[in-house]
Amino acid sequence: MKVGLVRWVPGLVLILAAAVWLIAAVASSGRAGSPPLPVPHPQVGDYVQLTHSETPPTQAQCNSAGRRCFTPQSTRAAYNVNPLYARGYDGSGRTIAIVDSYGSDTMAHDLHVYDQTFGLPPMCGEEGVTCSAGMPKFSQLSLQGSPATKAPPSKSNGTGQEDKSAWALEVALDVETSHAMAPGANILLVHTPTAETLGVQGFPQMMAAEKYVVDNHLADVISQSFGSAEDAFGSTRSLENLRDAFKAAAANGVTVLASSGDGGSANDKKTPVGKGGSTIPVPTVEWPASDPLVAGVGGTYLCTDATNTTTRTLDNVSPPVNCQGQPEQEIGWIDSGGGFSHVFSRPAFQNTLPAGSTTIPQTQRGVPDIGLQASSRTGALVYLTLPPDGNSGLICPGGQPCSTGWYDIGGTSLSCPQWAGLIAIAAQIRGGGLGTINNALYAIATDPAAYANDFFDITAGNNQADPDVPGYNNTPGWDPVTGLGTPNAAHLLPELVAYSLTH
């Protein structure tokens, strides 16, 4: 199920120098004659509100809504992260930058509720927490100002892309799940207040903000849970003009990740603003996940024992455990964005693939590179406070306004920030940023023994989300649904570190 909403947000610290620099960058990108750019949209595939208070839902409540709700503990167990925690590796001393539009003015409160509920270490900067030495820090960097999280006026004639309360759900998902995966890492929520300006929409501001983060050495890894179809850009040049942040990240040892999208093999080719509002489904992939300097993150349907907190169990028990009648399994998610780029040719790191992989044409970059849980039916619990004035901006299934409470959320917006948490842990092991990880991922995967040890190869499923657009099947090795597969973190992360130290 997909819900046709736009969701995201941010909010606080105004740095004047950054704002002046960013405004100049945006102004230069929007000069007369520049082609209009597409609006970046968040990759929340589906969500359902399960409670209307700070009390989290029980698994029985999740089951009644057709959901298998993951907690931080069960996700960690599924991807074998616990042995790393036992060795003291939790992302301490490293920083995750999460980039969103708008932000959320309730994030400090929501993070505190989330941490208290699941027994996670508190962060300096969350509501009600006294900071102490060694505590991870949550902070916000607001470039160009920080508008309050509110719904648009009821008679607004806008595009709907500026729905700040809807974007708040994306922010809560990104911040809470990245902290759950790397509880010792700092989190910097970076946000811009612009979804659309004079036909140059969102991306220039976001990319300029990321360039600021890289140039000022503010983070080790950047998580991007947004994207737009490559074919929605006015030209290849208009997309190429946005890549400076990624080039700077590669040169400065910063890892950049991006959600591969929630349209399966199909994405909307949006008509530029001022040209009408129609969309055309086409077989294409999303940028920035398609960028060779970025690790594109796809999604899986992951179903394990809801009470499991110690090991990965995919043992097909009978009767099935909380999987809505399905056996315990991890398969490709039907909405996982994937396919082949229309802009970038196959990068060198994809020249050699594991045995059985889907073939990648020489003229096209294959997307995604890696995967993690993303199905809306086996999603993660997230807490969100919605201000009363913003409630009408977020509509829950059934057409009713959502409210404050606990949500179960799916989408590649879920897989990307959790991978960012894993990379923060790897950066702690290394003692510094890993930089671009694609070379390492594919080098490890081409060794059969290392691949079997470090990845969970996803060999079942497909991503034909639109019946009118051909999809792709999961295969052994790499495929255009989940990439190389999902991580066996305790084995993969040290291998990524070892590669980064020798190359």
Image (tube, grey):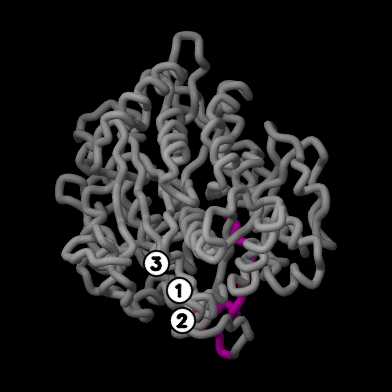
As drawn, the residue found furthest toward the top would be 32
- Percent position of residue 252, x then y: 55, 42
Residue marked by disc 2: 306
Residue name at image x 33 percent, y 79 percent: 58
Mark found first going from the N terminus, 2 or 1: 1
Residue name at image x 63 percent, y 62 percent: 497
Residue marked by disc 3: 184
Q: Main secondary structure of the magenta part?
A: loop
Residue 195 in view here: yes
Q: CA distance from mark 2 to mark 3?
A: 25 Å
Q: Provide the secondary structure element on which disc 2 rests.
A: loop
- Please tell me whether mark 2 or mark 3 is closer to you in this view: 3
54 horizontally vs 430: left or right = left
Circles 2 and 3: CB atoms closer than 8 Å: no
Q: Is residue 327 magenta?
A: yes
Q: Nearer the viewer, residue 108 or 130?
A: 130
Quarter residue 250 falls in: top right
Q: Provide the secondary structure element on which disc 1 rests.
A: loop
User: Which residues lie in the magenta part?
Assistant: 318-337
- Percent position of residue 415, x then y: 51, 59
Circles 2 and 1: CB atoms closer than 8 Å: yes
Residue name at image x 42 percent, y 72 percent: 72
52 horizontally vs 481: left or right = left
Q: Which mark is residue 68?
A: 1
Three-letter residue code for mark 1: Arg
Three-letter residue code for mark 2: Ala
Mark found first going from the N terminus, 2 or 3: 3
